[in-house]
Image: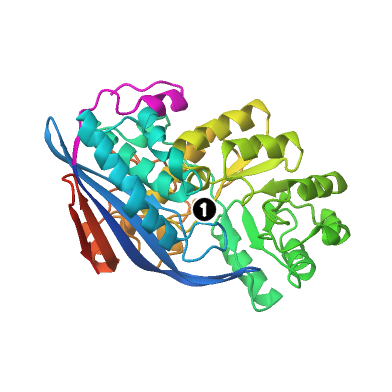
C-alpha cells in the first residue's frame, strides 16, 4: 500500500480499502513484573498489569488478526482510568460497539470512521486508544504494511532517554545515573518530590555537569512552593515536569513566568484541546507526548502538528509498555522529528519478561529504530501472552456471544 507523506492523512485513511469481517474480540488481563520497583512521589510500582486486545477476523486472503495494548496502570496514580476501568469499558462498551458497527457495515471501519465509536466514552481515552491500536494493527497486517511505512518513517535510530526513580540516598542515585550515562543514554529524567529534590539534583549535576537532565515531580508541589522551585534554575535543567496538579494550568503559568527553567506538562495534557490551552496560557513550553493519554495515534499526530507550528519541543513519554506498544511510540517519535530523547528504551530494560517474539534478540538498550514488521509493532509471542494471562473474555460477533475465562 502506498502511503501519503502526511502521516495524519495516511492514518485517517487506513482501512478505506480494506475489507475485513470481524468474528471475535479477546480482552486479556496480563500481569508482568518490573525489573526494579519505580519509586515516585506518588507511590511505588513493582508490577505492570497490561490489558491486551486481540481482534480475530477474515479478509479476502483468509484469516487476519490484530492486537492492541492499553496503557492503563494498576491504579490511578497517573490517570483517572486504571486497568480495571479500561477492561470494563472495553468489555461492556467499546468492543461490542465495534462488533456491531462491523456487522452492520459488513466491514471493519477505517481509522477515520473509528472516532465515531468513542463519542460516549470520551473520558476513557486509554481504553479507546487501545482499541484504535488494535483496529489499525488489523488493517496494517491485512495490507502487509508497517506503521513506520504508513507514516513514511525511515530506519534512523530515535534518541532514547532513561528514567530514574527516587532512591534510598544520593550515593545510590548517582551510581544509577553513572551506569546509565556510561551505557550511552542521551537524557536522564529524575523523579523528585518534597524532601527529595535539591540535594539529589545537586549531586547528579556535580557528577555530570553537562548532562541533559530533566526532573519530574508528578504533581507533588503547590503554588506555595514557587520560590523553592524557582531555585532549581541554578541546576540548568532541560525542564521541570508537572510540578503542580494536572488541572492547575494557571499555577503552572505563574511558575513558568518565575523560572528560567522550561516547564513541561504531562498529566495535564489529556486531549488536543488541553495542549492548545496550555500553550496559549504559557503554562508550559515543553510537551510530554503520550499517545494513549490523548486517546490514540490520531490525536497524537495532531499534537505533533500543533507543536511543530508553534516551535514547541516535545518528547515521547512512556508508561512501561510491552515491546509491542513501545515500538508504536518509537514510530511516533520518528514522525515528530524531535531531538529530545524520549522514554523509548526497549521493554526488556524495565520488564522482567517482555511479550514480543524479538525481545530476546535486542542488540542493546540504545538500538531503537522503527519496526518494519507488518502491523503497529513487532509480533507478540502467543505462548508468552498465554502464560501471563490471568483473565480473559471473548466477545463473539453473534448476539449473546460472550465467554469468560478466569
The residue tagged with tag 1: helix, strand or loop?
loop
**Is the C terminus in the top left, top right, bottom left or bottom right quadrant?**
bottom left
Residue at the (28%, 66%) spot, across then down: 391
Indicate left or right for 136 with 215 as reference.
Answer: left
Query: Residue 230: image x %, image y %?
Result: 85, 55
Task: Pick whichever, 396 or 243, lies toward us.
Answer: 396
The answer to whether residue 56 is magenta is no
Residue range in magenta is 1-22
Judge whether residue 314 can be spotted in this image. Answer: yes
Indicate left or right for 146 with 335 as reference.
Answer: left
Residue that mark 1 sits on: 318
Residue at the (58%, 36%) spot, across then down: 272
Q: Extreme bottom residue here?
A: 168
What color scheme is it?
Answer: rainbow
Q: Is 170 located above or below residue 264 in the figure? A: below
Query: Image quadrant of residue 309?
Result: top right
Query: Image quadrant of residue 269?
Result: top right
Query: Residue 3: image x %, image y %?
Result: 36, 23
Query: Residue 328: image x %, image y %?
Result: 41, 44
Residue at the (37%, 34%) spot, across then down: 114
Judge whether residue 373 can be spotted in this image. Answer: no
Task: Pick whichever, 371 or 178, lies toward us.
Answer: 371
Neighbor class of circle 1 (other Cα within 10 Å; few <14, some 14-19, many 20+) is many
**Is the N terminus in the top left, top right, bottom left or bottom right quadrant?**
top left
Q: Is 198 located above or below residue 264 in the figure? A: below
Q: Extreme front residue here?
A: 400
Task: Pick whichever, 255 or 262, lies toward us.
Answer: 255
Amino acid at each position: 500500500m502506498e502511503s501519503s507523506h502526511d502521516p495524519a492523512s495516511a492514518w485517517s485513511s487506513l482501512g478505506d480499502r480494506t475489507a475485513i469481517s470481524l468474528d471475535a474480540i479477546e480482552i486479556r488481563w496480563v500481569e508482568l513484573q518490573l525489573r526494579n520497583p519505580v519509586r515516585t512521589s506518588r507511590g511505588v510500582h513493582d508490577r505492570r498489569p497490561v490489558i491486551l486486545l486481540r481482534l480475530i477476523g477474515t479478509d479476502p486472503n483468509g484469516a487476519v488478526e490484530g492486537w492492541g495494548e492499553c496503557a492503563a496502570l494498576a491504579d490511578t496514580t497517573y490517570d483517572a482510568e486504571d486497568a480495571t476501568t479500561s477492561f470494563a469499558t472495553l468489555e461492556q462498551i467499546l468492543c461490542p460497539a465495534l462488533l456491531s458497527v462491523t456487522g452492520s457495515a459488513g466491514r471493519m471501519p477505517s481509522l477515520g470512521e473509528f472516532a465515531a465509536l468513542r463519542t460516549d466514552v470520551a473520558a476513557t481515552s486509554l481504553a479507546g486508544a487501545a482499541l484504535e491500536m488494535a483496529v489499525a494493527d488489523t488493517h496494517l497486517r491485512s495490507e502487509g504494511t508497517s506503521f513506520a511505512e504508513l507514516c513514511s518513517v525511515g530506519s534512523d535510530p530515535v534518541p532514547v532517554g532513561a528514567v530514574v526513580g527516587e532512591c534510598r540516598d544520593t550515593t545510590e542515585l548517582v551510581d544509577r545515573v553513572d551506569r546509565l550515562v556510561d551505557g550511552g543514554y542521551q537524557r536522564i529524567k529524575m523523579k523528585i518530590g518534597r524532601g527529595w529534590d535539591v540535594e539529589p539534583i545537586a549531586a547528579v549535576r556535580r557528577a555530570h555537569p553537562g548532562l541533559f537532565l530533566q526532573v519530574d515531580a508528578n504533581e507533588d508541589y503547590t503554588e506555595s512552593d514557587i520560590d523553592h522551585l524557582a531555585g532549581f534554575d541554578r541546576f540548568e535543567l532541560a525542564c521541570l515536569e508537572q510540578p503542580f496538579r494536572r488541572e492547575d494550568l494557571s499555577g503552572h503559568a505563574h511558575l513558568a513566568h518565575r523560572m528560567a527553567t522550561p516547564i513541561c506538562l504531562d498529566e495535564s495534557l489529556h486531549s488536543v484541546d488541553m495542549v492548545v490551552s496550555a500553550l496559549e496560557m504559557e503554562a508550559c513550553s515543553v510537551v510530554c507526548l503520550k499517545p494513549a493519554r490523548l486517546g490514540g495515534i490520531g490525536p497524537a499526530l495532531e499534537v505533533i502538528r500543533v507543536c511543530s507550528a508553534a516551535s514547541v519541543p516535545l518528547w515521547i513519554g512512556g508508561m512501561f509498555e510491552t515491546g509491542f506498544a513501545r515500538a508504536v511510540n518509537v514510530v511516533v517519535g520518528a514522525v515528530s522529528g524531535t531531538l529530545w530523547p524520549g522514554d523509548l528504551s526497549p521493554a526488556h530494560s524495565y520488564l522482567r519478561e517482555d511479550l514480543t517474539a524479538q525481545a530476546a534478540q535486542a542488540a542493546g538498550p540504545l538500538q531503537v529504530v522503527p519496526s518494519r514488521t507488518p502491523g503497529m509493532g513487532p509480533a507478540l509471542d502467543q505462548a508468552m501472552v498465554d502464560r501471563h494471562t490471568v483473565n480473559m473474555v471473548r466477545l463473539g460477533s453473534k448476539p449473546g456471544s460472550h465467554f469468560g475465562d478466569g
